[in-house]
Amino acid sequence: VNSLILNTTTRLLVALMLVFSVFLLMRGHNEPGGGFVGGLVVAAAFSLYGFAFGVTATRRALRAEPQSLIVAGLLVAVGSGLVPIVFTGAPFLTGLWDDTTIPVIGKLGTPLVFDVGVYLVVTGATLNIIFTLAEKEE
Amino acid sequence: MGLLSAILTGFGAACVAPALCRIRPTGGSRILALLPVALMFYFSGLIDDVAAGGPVHVRYDWIPSLGIHLSLHADALALLFCMLISLIGACVFLYASGYLAGDRDIGRFYFWIMIFMAAMLGVVLSANLITLFVFWELTSISSYMLIGYYHEQASARAAALQALLVTGAGGLALMAGFILLGTAGGSFEIADLLGQGNAIRDHPLYIPILILVLLGAFTKSAQFPFHFWLPNAMAGPAPVSAYLHSATMVKAGIYLMARLAPILGQTAIWEITLTVVGAGTMVWSAILAARQTDMKRVLAYSTITILGALTLLIGAGTALSVKAAVILLLAHSLYKGALFMVAGIVDHETGERDVTRLGGLYRVLPVTACAAAVAAFSNAGMPPMLGFIAKEYFYKAKLDLGDFAVVLTGAALAANVMLVVVALLVGFAPFYGQARETPKPAHEAPWPMLVGPVLLAGLGLLFGTIPTDLDTVLIQPAVRTITGDPSITITLGLWHDLIRNPTAALALSAATIVLGVVVYRSVGRIRTVRLPAAVGLERVYEGAVAGMLAVAQWQTRILQNGYLRSYVLTILTVTIGLVGWRLLGVRIDVPFASLQGVQFYQAAVCVLIAAGALFAVWAPTRLSAIASLGVVGLGMTMVFFLNGAPDLALTQIFVETLTVILFVLAFYRLPQLHVYSSLPVRARDAAVATAAGCMMTSLVLLARHGRFQNPISSYFAEHSYTLARGRNVVNVILVDFRGLDTFGEIIVLSVAALGVLAMIKLRIGQRARRAAAWERQ
């Protein structure tokens, strides 16, 4: 497929969707959203990009191997769980919070970091499957 | 703190070992040998503390609610083992730097052997049964990795697996035994249990405890009929055999029996079991040892002989036999460690370790030959070695046993005669006589490989001849710990016993040596004598492994057959069966009255979903089926929106979108949809699907009633903001209240993604290989 309309709108939409995914991730703790759905939005965005420009270009646009995203996400999640053990001696994955309030995000805390890990894993896992299947097609 | 750091430094050093060995292959490994030396000094420093102010004890809470603590305890018995582990560890680490010089995987070797050392120290220092068990299993695992060091060889892998399965099975029994023991004694702390000895021996669980704990000890210490794994474990490199499979790890079972003797011992069943198993192991393996020709296998079987003797002595439990056990343990660790390293040198330098094809090596390996001779003297129990004193005590202890004295002394004599034969086979035969052609031109080993055997053999000589304070500092306190009797004294004196007190034991010793030489002269005939076959559990082991694999294959063919349709069918049928069975006779009210409030758009969504589902079943093409499933999914999304679950709706939209994309990608190349299934199969599927739908509907209707006593949702709703500072309850549950579940789920997701990758990429690889093979033809 090489459609001018698809290509042009894709460029616009992908950028919007990526911003939207971060928005969903950040507001997740107080409003509908969260890391899981945020990750799915990223995956959807890159699938769209894939339809327009092909898998190879999409892999290049992603700039990281999906497997690396999975690994990074798991590490971030583990790290957010270890923070309370190291700093306060509380059990694994206890939520620690900073009390300053930031617009949209609310308060900063380790659960948010954990959600970032979920976001990365979901993105990586979904794109990994989609890319692998799509490459089989080509 | 000190004890824990001593163990942790081992684990820490293990982690840096591979990097160190990569940077400086020879120098790095020699630096690593300094750690056990340092540990040895540390433990010898503790001896005085223990002698003066009782045991050193540290404890950290681990799972206090279950009585499980990380508690470590250094008393005389533990220190004796710690000294052996660190001393022989130092020799072995240095030795291995020469033995494995130039080996690509030397870093892996040092990693695992240091893990082993730390774990073994943990076993003997643990004061809590559960802690002990954890370290115990860690020694089994490191042993597995070390036996399988030459993992390119199928035989090494098989031997490693066999050792792991046998000791691992024993380990499971041991864990069960420990849990029962903790239940019976009310604590997992060994110190608490020591005071409960009588209560535990009278407890109804005593017999199961004893059986399970002894299973663990017997498998680990290669007692008959579980002995077969040890000779096979010789597939590992010589340093591993010297360290794990003669000097330390196989003595863990002996250690455990000695440690638990005050708690579980002193009953008829304990004494009879240990005596019979120990004596049987001792005699049978002694005969087998003399029949071997491979130096390492000879040594392996004779190690089993000593392990049997130690079991026998601990089982008897008299002061004299415990003394004999401790001295024998010490003497054996020294000389057997040395002999294994000698065997390794011979193998390494000549490329041959069959004693019938070796001879006259003393000309090319003079230092090794000396060390071998001294160690073999100790092995044979010749004066003035520590081994001689050990054997004297062994005989004395046997003669002292009253009713069974004659039988057991006879068994001991037979075993000791064979040990003389072993000493001659390994310590003398390869070095004297006519020189033979060897696969490699032999020359003396480099110094790092000689330090260990010379030092260990020399210590056996030193402790035998010169009166040191070894007896009062190490042996006597250890004997007191095992027997629980603080009045026992012991003096090691070779000439003391030899001259002033000529006893029956001395006469037996003389007879042993004479008989040993006589038997050695006809050792060729012993090798050819036919023994009753199939003694031992090795056949049973092989049968069990083969059977397990067959069952696994069978059930995999049935359950994991690769057809998604049969997986779905199995899952649904089982769920329907279990849930339906539970729902039988439960009254489910359908609230028709509340249906009046249903709005038009709600009904429309429901009709849409049902229509989509039905159309998916009858769809003529794959694409239309996928599209109609998408209708079902989007209908669900609308239900979520209409009922105030925007989170779910949002997620559902994206899941649906991506699912459709995935389906399209996966189905794009598949052939046209055909009806392959017959009518009965379709009828069955329809029935299962309908039943599943009915089940879910009933569950939803039941859940609606709020029959559950305290719905947890209100707790989450109340505490979401106060505890977790989030107003979005769904997300708070995901990342905070149920964070660990989510953590598990993202791991599952990652594994699934990697699985898809592996499955598809590997398929492509296979196809490419097949194509290449086709072209070659």
Image (tube, rainbow, N blue to C red):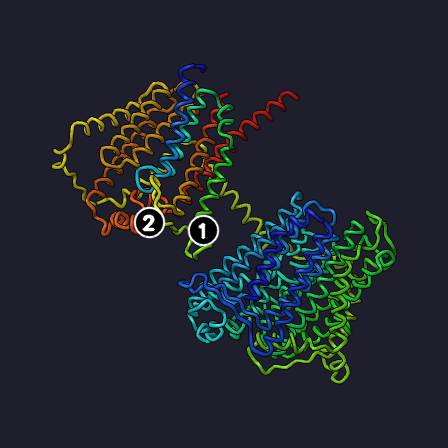
Residue that label 1 marks: A83
Q: What element carries label 1?
A: helix
Q: Which mark is residue B174?
A: none
Against B227, residue B750 (above or below) is: above
Q: Position of residue B250 (x, y in %)?
A: 62, 61
Please tell me which residue lies in front, B48 or B503.
B48
| Label tally | 2
- What SS does tag 2 mark? helix
* Quarter location, residue B580: top left
Q: Do the residues labelled 2 and 1 touch (CB within 8 Å)?
A: no
Residue found at the far bottom of this picture: B500
Check disc 1: other Cα within 10 Å, few if <14, some if 14-19, many if 20+: some
- The Cα atoms of the two marked residues, 2 and 1, are separated by 16 Å
- Which residue corresponds to the image point at 39% horizontal and 47% vertical from the top-left? A109
In this rendering, position of residue B341 left or right of residue B752? right
Q: Name the residue under label 2.
A: B724
Give the residue drawn at x 28%, y 31%. B637
Location of residue A122 by image quarter? top left
